[in-house]
Amino acid sequence: MSAQPPSTGTPAGPDRGRLLLAVLLGGGFLALVLLLAWGVSQSDRPDRESLPSPLIGRPAPEFSLPVLHDASYSVGTAELQGQPYLLNVWGSWCPGCQVEHPVLARYAETKAIRVVGYNWKDEPEDALRWLEQFGNPYWVVVADYEGGTAIEWGIYGAPETFLVDAEGIVRWKHVGPLSDDIIDTVVAPMVEGMRTGG
Amino acid sequence: MLPEIGQAALLLALVFAVLQGFAGLAGAARGREDLAAVTRTAALAQFVLVLVAYVLLTLAFVVQDFSVMYVTDNSNSLLPLIYRYTAVWGAHEGSLLLWALMLAVWNAAVAVLSGRIPWSFRARALGVIGLVAVGFLSFMVFTSNPFERLLPAALEGHDLNPLLQDPGMIIHPPLLYIGYIGFVVPFAFAIAALLEGAIDARWLRWSRPWTNVAWGFLTLGIAMGSWWAYYELGWGGWWFWDPVENASFMPWLAGAALIHSQAVTEKRGSFNSWTMLLAIAAFSLSLLGAFLVRSGVLTSVHSFAADPARGLFILAFLGVVIGGALLVYVLRAPRLAQGKPFAAWSRETLLLVNNLLLASACAMVLLGTLYPLIADALDLGKVSVGPPYFGTLFLVLMAPLVFLVPFGPLTRWQQEQGSKPLAMLAPWLGLAVLLGLLAWFKAPQGALKTGFGVAGAAWVALGTLRFVWTRLRAKGRSFTPEMFGMVLGHLGIAVFVTGAMLVEAQNVLREVPMVPGETQEIGRYAFRFDGVERVPGPNYMADRGHVQVFRDDRPLVLLHPEKRAYASGGQVMTDAGIHAGVRADIFVALGEPLGGDAWAVRLHIKPFVRWIWAGALLMALGGFITAADRRFRLPLKEAR
């Protein structure tokens, strides 16, 4: 867009005008291509669009929710305190949760940390059937049918995963399906650090 | 077996595209007319082959061949038949095939309809289109094969994104793609002209209708998308300055500028190299749009799944096309002849201002769209650029354009006494200001915007009609389709401005919890909520609300806003209940259930919102009618 619409002859002479045009067009074009190339190289970074959660480094919002398998029990921040836990938001309606399910199951088997399921806006029958079909990797599953607690946690989609330490401080949050890569490079070292540090 | 044939057809089409590119450019460069003649055959063969591939993919959807991965990912045995046809372009691979098909259509049309222009020029233009087709087809064949098999075949598909299961979606993408890819024709003509080293009024005249038609389709496509977002997303807005909307808007702005500058170049021989640059820019921005949508570089409600390999491929393609075009431009453009000189007050000057304003708006949108990426690259933090930036700057840039529109047609080429058009228009300017003032005082809210909106719209409409009147009274001067198209386009601006400004100023929104039997009043309207019932759809379960609307205490309409939960995937879609009207839309959307029988309900009154799309429709119609002018198809001597 930077070229001059030619009306009458340019005072600087045709050669200088031509050089200027070439520099402007070429420079703009190169800058654009470099920028886009950088963008492409970043586009598969999973956390690229996620804003850092304001919860990180702060106490996890308190909750107490009925247990999916037996609604007469409730589990919440009070019960979970004392040991770190991984809070995984899922729903039987969520395709991304199916994708990350085997990853989560493999990690849960290592027993490195309690994996707490947070069943969000789901019919209990559907959720139970889902766990039966795919396997239940969770230490416990709480059910938030109305989605009231989710608002305080800033959950806006599933799957989402929070890492909370023994003091009940949120350490890390991930939006979207977990991958083996994320578990190995991010979650496992942090959990290891919490164990040895605390 | 059939999907394999489709894939083979695509590969063969790629071979023909390579042949077309080579035969066209080499044939023209070597002066071999026989070689250049191959382009026509290659273009037609490509069209047939891509059409075969497209039909086969559609067939795979219709018969639900879940052994094709793309079909499995984007349909479901419950999907209604009509959406199986449209699901073809529901995701990346298939929509790319639709692009390729549209390109093949334009390509074949140029090959068939370009008999009158000199062979070397035609060969070069077709050669350029051939190379573009090589890019698109190899992108599809190497990174995004829609016919890829899924073995073992799935028993059931994942379903089409529910957002896309909608009548508006049936026509939005095809219209948009025809427009996007249509800019390949002026682009190819510009490159061919630069390679020839001279601009001939004949070629320019011949390329004008193509630009107009492509721009008209792009206008329709964008308007259709805006309308779809309005009723389907349930937000009640009509434009969001979302990166993907911007991606379609940038070529539109460049195209609008191009339509005008092409007219100057054809008629006066001025702006030669500027017109060439705009033609390059319009198509480059179309490609940039495709890149932004498909590479995952920017996120938006529209974007396809991110895949760096694809992103890299389009980027390389983009780099070759734009870089190559700019290189040819820089080397050749300075040789182009300068046009006839013109005075400071002339139609040329007005069109120059028009072009500068449209180009600035385009640059502004480009900067705003890429800024989050720039900020991220320079580590300035996460930034999002939203309506406050775009809306304000766009208004600032378009206001002078709106003011100048009526002067254009009334001002003569080359030289004009400034007082003449001013004298003709002064009374109408006065009337428009008067109407604006009246609206200002009568407006219940948003007086300033209402006043300016009404004044601006009235000014454009009256000023344009003043031109029609002058023209009709003048003896012996015909009123050509080209003029009629221009008048419609400019009236479209007036209608659009009315809609955009008034809905912005007068729109009323109320978000309230309602229990059955409760009534809410907004101005002259009353809304009685009669509860929600569960209704099964073909592949979803809907909560359907019943809202009785009254105007002046008389029943007006019963609206049924819905929230649909789709069987597969569990996505929830809102489907607003809308009563459309010339003066206002009544828009009711269902929010969340609040326990008991209570629901959150959004009640909207949107005055004049239809005028936005009506205006766009008029503009597109103007483009088509202009393109239909016989003058563009006459041999050179008879045309002047």
Image: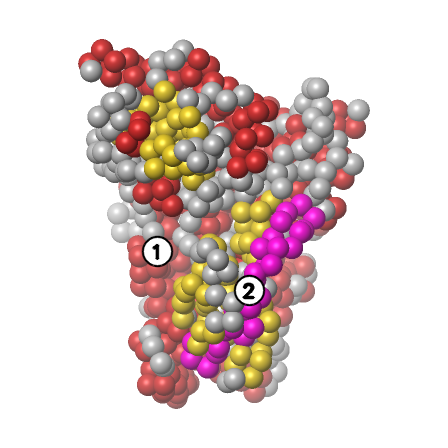
Disc 2 marks a residue whose amino acid type is: Gly
Q: Chain of mark 2?
A: B
Q: Residues within 10 Å of mark 2 (few under 14, many from 20)?
A: some
Q: Chain of mark 1?
A: B
Percent of width and height locating residue A130: 56, 29
Q: Nearer the viewer, mark 2 or mark 1?
A: 2
Residue B554 seen in the figure: yes
Q: Is residue A163 above or below residue B629?
A: above
Residue that appears at 35% across and 68% down: B399
Secondary structure predominantly adopted by residues drawn in magenta: strand
Quarter containing the C terminus of chain A: top left
Residue B108 seen in the figure: no
Q: Which residue is mark 2?
A: B531
Q: Nearer the viewer, residue B512 or A84?
A: A84
* Mark 1 element type: helix
Q: Nearer the viewer, residue A113 or B210?
A: A113
Percent of width and height locating residue A69: 49, 30
Q: Nearer the viewer, residue A145 or B289?
A: A145
Task: Identify the magenta region.
Answer: B522-549
- Disc with the residue nearer the chain's start (2 vs 1): 1
Residue that appears at 48% across and 65% down: B515
- Tell whether position B543 is magenta: yes
Residue that appears at 33% across and 85% down: B441
Disc 1 marks a residue whose amino acid type is: Pro
The tag on residue B45 is none
**Occupied quadrant, residue B91:** top right
The tag on residue B387 is 1
Q: Is residue B626 above or below residue B553?
A: above
* Mark 2 element type: strand
- Tell whether position B273 is magenta: no
